[in-house]
Image: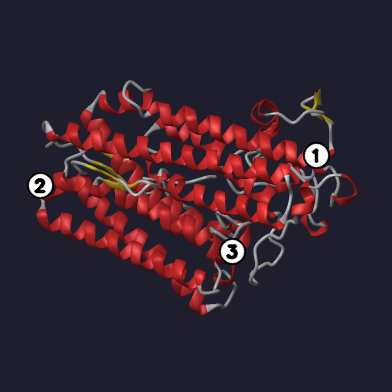
Amino acid sequence: MKTLTTTAAAMSLCAAPLFAADSAEVLDTYADIAQAGYEDSLTTAKALQKAVDALIANPSEDTLAAARDAWLAARVPYQQTEVFRFGNAIVDDWEGKVNAWPLDEGLIDYVDASYGGPSDENQFAGLNVIATPSFTLSGEEIDASEITPELIAETLHEADGVEANVASGYHAIEFLLWGQDLNGTDAGAGDRSFADYASGDACTNGNCDRRAEYLQAATELLVSDLEWMAAQWQEGGAARDALMEDEDAGIVAMLTGMGSLSYGEQAGERMRLGLMLNDPEEEHDCFSDNTHNSHFYDGKGVQNVYLGSYTRVDGTEVTGASLSDLVAEADPALDEEMKAKLHTTMENLGAIVAAAEDGFSYDMMLERGNAEGEALIMGGVDALVDQTRSIERVVSALSVDSIDFEGSDSLDNPSAVFQ
């Protein structure tokens, strides 16, 4: 998705660095949190894989519900790892395999007639590979008679160079578990039947065996992708080694991830843009109506990095020297300001979660003219933007060389959104 770097979100500072020996300890904590977060993401993805296998073996309302619950649980640790993007090229280059969105779901499976079909922008928007065992891509005949992780990763994902052709990752799996959410800005998530995975005459919507094949292959691919990334943060892993090569650059990576996720990505592309368009298709977890939690745990990831603390899925804590420690030494008042801003953001994102769990779902909040929904979403947006301003001040206080935070038209050039 296109982002902008703007004057408001970019700075170039050229002062001598303050960092001494303890910056290495801060980077160690950061890498430990990354390792733990990706390991937790892997653990919960493996639990999802078991639930998917149980659904395929015995399709029922209960096994479908269990697979959905496992998917929701898997999102909790993964969303907290998104703060490691932007500043770490190894993560940003990889992330599109597992969390790309939004997707043209017609590439994968059947969709409602209102969805439409192929367009000039995406000839494969209505491919429905589950019902299509062979097709032509770039002049080559593709044999899709067997749906494998390799077919998904190497042929279908971003087919024809179109980013919306998302064939792998959490959101492809989400679509296969929930189906399309056809409720607009009314209450309700996707409502796929377990019978979409049944056999024989009990099968609904056809091709249940291939649908099961796709779901299992996509889940296997998610697990293998997470295995790879978790390994990169272990001792001797490429991500950890790259981080530790230059301590000042490592601190820059931490701050870049915090600022870019807070500002352009979350406040802009994931929250403000959807509100401007009043479009539930812009929800991050749109099929499951889990967007409120997605936003919350993105925010939590930023807070984790600053405070040097992460709570694992088993309840244990990963803690150590932190950015907060560095800032407190350089400017104690700024450290208190930064912690307060992060706390306010989490309170405001928590208010969105509380409202959603009380029946006021995120897509309902997006409805045009819904003042209560707009206030909740903008409370999160404003807090994220405000904390980014303090992150900019942290950059200055720590005398970091230069940082460019990701931007968003929705924040920096709103009129461009409607052009």
Q: Residue at x 79, y 29 (%)?
A: 144
Tell me if residue 128 comes above or below residue 353 in the rendering: above
**Secondary structure under the numbered disc 3 in the rendered image:** helix
Relative to 165, is 293 on the left or the right? left
Query: Picture coordinates of residue 318 (x, y %)?
Result: 28, 43
Query: Picture coordinates of residue 174 (x, y %)?
Result: 63, 49
Q: CA distance from mark 2 to mark 3?
A: 42 Å
| Location of mark 3 (residue) | 277
| Location of mark 1 (residue) | 209
Tell me if residue 384 comes above or below residue 158 in the rendering: below
Task: Identify the mark at residue 329; answer none if there is no mark.
Answer: none
Relative to 296, is 370 on the left or the right? right
Question: Is any part of residue 6 visible from this angle?
Answer: yes
Q: Residue at x 34, y 48 (%)?
A: 259
User: Few, some or many C-alpha atoms within 10 Å of disc 3 (few <14, some 14-19, many ≥20)?
Assistant: some
**Secondary structure under the numbered disc 2 in the rendered image:** helix
| Location of mark 2 (residue) | 330
Residue type at mark 3: give it.
Leu
Which quarter of the image is occupied by the C terminus?
bottom right
User: Few, some or many C-alpha atoms within 10 Å of disc 2 (few <14, some 14-19, many ≥20)?
Assistant: some
